[in-house]
Image (cartoon, helix red, strand yellow):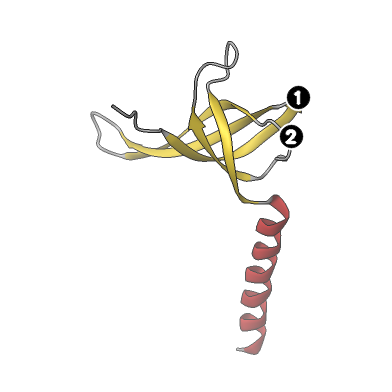
Amino acid sequence: MTKKLIDKIGVVVSDKMNKSRVVMVEFMTQHPKYKKTIKKRRKFMAHDENNITKVGDIVRIIQTRPLSRKKRWKIVEILGRKQEILDKKEEISGATQDNATSC
């Protein structure tokens, strides 16, 4: 019998610890009484063996055996770097400014 691996995608919000990162995961849920969709956040402490992630990186984490009192997650892949995200935002904002001036 194989266990299903639980994975989540989030943003690194802290890299001040050695081989550990704090990853914030956002998810949408529905209020039980009012049925309004609410955005919630949760922070997970994740293991980063080589200290390669930085604040702002988008990462995928999977659940693993307990590594310490608070760490039960491990970073398996980096989906995006902070600088790449900033470059894309600048390209988008530059394109919208060009369109606004051409009209």
Name the disc covering residue 51, or none: 2
Does the CB distance between marks 1 and 2 fall below 8 Å? yes
Give 95 or 97, whichever is nearer the viewer: 95
80 relative to 76, above or below: below
Q: Residues within 10 Å of mark 2 (few under 14, many from 20)?
A: few
The local secondary structure at tag 1 comes to loop
- x then y, percent, for residue 33: 23, 29
Disc 1 target residue? 18
101 relative to 24, above or below: below
Residue at 59%, 35% (x, y): give it.
Answer: 75
Residue at 67%, 70% (x, y): give it.
Answer: 91
- x then y, percent, for residue 87: 70, 63
Residue at 66%, 35% (x, y): give it.
Answer: 13
- x then y, percent, for residue 1: 28, 26
Quadrant in which residue 35 is drawn: top left
Quadrant in which residue 57 is drawn: top right
The local secondary structure at tag 2 comes to loop
Q: Quarter of the image containing the C terminus?
A: bottom right
